[in-house]
Amino acid sequence: MALCICNCFTLSNHNPLKFSNSIPRASLFQRHTHLHPPRETPSSPCLTKRDLGLSIVAIFLNGFLPNLQKAILAQDLELQRYTDSKEGFTLLRPSSWIKVEKAGATALFEEANNGSNNIGVVVNPVRLTSLGEFGSPQFVADKLIEAERRKESTKDAVVIGFAERPGQGGLQVYEFEYEVDSTRGGMKRIFSAAFVASKKLYLVNITHSDKPESPLNSNTRIMLEQVLHSFDAAPLT
């Protein structure tokens, strides 16, 4: 997945394109932009008390105490901060997920006993100084899906939403959510974020199984969204 995103930003023999960006800087998951009707999933059971409690906390604190909200959710969801000072990025990651080594990945975390659920970070040099020089979030989302659909293993790929948010020092951070139906692992939900800093492209790709018979539950979704929103340039020390 990360390779598809990197390919979108390949600039050899290519002039950066500029697009006007009318997407408001808001949370990707407060406002979805549906480009394709979402697939129907089986009716899920009622929320557990834990799921309901997390949702209430998020709704109550959102917009009023954002820093406190992040701290409470991170603690309750058992997330811990991971910072790579050498490469210059930071994010939250599930404390129970295992860090593994893999060629081409700057950092990779996998769920214990289920490596198909993972968080991967890739850092590559680019000629850009910001994502805006390449295009709008919608433009990049379209390129992502085009790259996914060209894979032989891909049966279908659908964009669920995209957005832009400010990062460390005013960086442009693009966020994407899409789903891929593949012959390798079936239906998966993908959350991605990207930013450019010091002429390096930073990408995080969060992949989780989302099969019709066992759809992504609300508690796991909240956790993955927190990971996505936490991805940023590391603070200068």
Image (cartoon, helix red, strand yellow):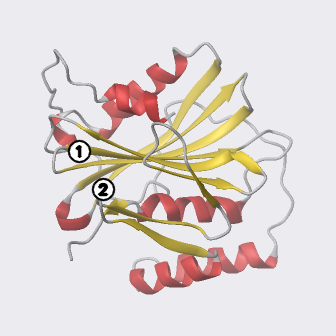
Q: Position of residue 15 (x, y in %)?
A: 12, 21
Q: In the figure, residue 131 lies in which quadrant?
A: top left
Residue annotated with mark 1: 200
What amino acid type is highlighted by mark number 2? Glu
What amino acid type is highlighted by mark number 1? Lys
Task: Give the camera-side residue of 83 and 217.
Answer: 83
Q: Position of residue 184 (x, y in %)?
A: 72, 26
Which quadrant: the C terminus? bottom left
The answer to whether residue 116 is left or right of residue 24 is right
Task: Give the camera-side residue of 80 and 61.
Answer: 80
Residue annotated with mark 2: 87
Q: Position of residue 23 (x, y in %)?
A: 29, 47
The answer to whether residue 23 is left or right of residue 44 is left
The answer to whether residue 107 is left or right of residue 236 is right
Q: Secondary structure at mark 2?
A: loop
Q: In the figure, residue 140 lies in which quadrant?
A: top left
Residue drawn at x 40%, y 60% is: 231
Q: Position of residue 209 (x, y in %)?
A: 72, 43
Q: Are marks 2 and 1 in contact (CB under 8 Å)?
A: yes
Q: In the figure, residue 224 lies in which quadrant?
A: bottom right
Q: Earlier in the sequence, mark 2 or mark 1?
A: 2
